[in-house]
Image (cartoon, rainbow, N blue to C red):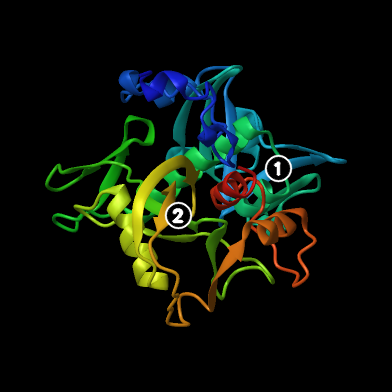
Amino acid sequence: MTFPLFSAPLREPSQFVGFAGNRIDRQAENRSEDTLPAALADPRLRVLQTRGGRLYLKINGADADAYFSLDEARGLGAKLEHAVLLGMGDAGPVIMAPGAIEPDDLPEGLKAIDHRSVYMQGLVSPETLGELAQGAALLTWHHTHRFCGRCGHATEMRIGGYKRICTNCAAEHFPRTDPVAIMLAVREDFCLLGRSPHFAPGMYSALAGFIEPGETIENAVRRETFEEAAIRLGRVAYHASQPWPFPYSLMIGCFGEALNEDIAFDGKELEDCRWFSRSEVRDMIAGVHSGGIVVPPPGAIASHLIRGWAEA
């Protein structure tokens, strides 16, 4: 019998979701107090800037450019003292810095567009979108971890943004990623989709929830599906993952084998949840469902789960 690894596709499903195109060389093993200053001294440096969850873009007609030179970034007052080093790109080092100018006050030719819209509208390349996910998650983590969780004193950034040190007790704090299970429960020719109150009109999606301490991915998938819809799952299979910088999550996509059909939900976290046939889901994907129901956009991992099942 062939070991499953060697029959897997060369390009895993995770490479086809939004925010997953990051090709930066993070050079994690070489990070030190000198790496960010060295990047700032490199004439090839490119700077990404974000403020209030919105990415600064240079707009020229239909083209959008997210990269600024060091001089351009300084001219806009970028907070380089709070910049994080993403790593080495094909054209040189890349950093992300908090922007100083309110989005509505940017000079002509510049716009600040929220990260989700940058992704939804395909305004930048997959590689740049991946860098955005890395940098935005890091900056958000730094913003929310300015004080030590051990003694409460201020912390300071170190090694280009990949550690904070407490100025009082010297405790070390490292950037975190929150794992989220997102799952498509299936039975025969039906899949389970739910609708949260904050979704766009007509949109249904896979269920999702945070993985808790001491819990496997598979058990989180089973627990969340039962808690949200009273559906018990048997076998669980991993499909793909997706970096999700809202604020710093990793979406872990799975399929689950449904063992019962009766759905129950509380009407709070989900306002609706139901089984959809494969033919219905195909209509939803094509945008021709008779009830106007749609699935998430193609770059979302939920969409990949749904499409992967519907088109199998």
Q: Amino acid at mark 2?
A: Met
The residue depicted at 49 percent of the width and 56 percent of the height is: 186
The residue depicted at 31 percent of the width and 20 percent of the height is: 29
Residue under numbered circle 2: 183
Looking at marks 1 and 2 on the same chain, the residue that comes earlier in the sequence is marked by 1
Toward the viewer: 284 or 195? 284
Query: Is label 1 or label 2 in front?
Result: 2
Location of residue 82 by image quarter:
top left
The residue depicted at 42 percent of the width and 26 percent of the height is: 36
Q: Amino acid at mark 1?
A: Leu
The local secondary structure at tag 1 comes to: strand
Whether residue 150 is visible here, answered yes or no, is yes
Q: How would you rate the neighbour count of disc 2 (Cα within 10 Å): few for under 14, some for 14-19, many for 20 or more?
A: many
Toward the viewer: 217 or 261? 261
Decide: is 222 above or below 90: below
The local secondary structure at tag 2 comes to: strand
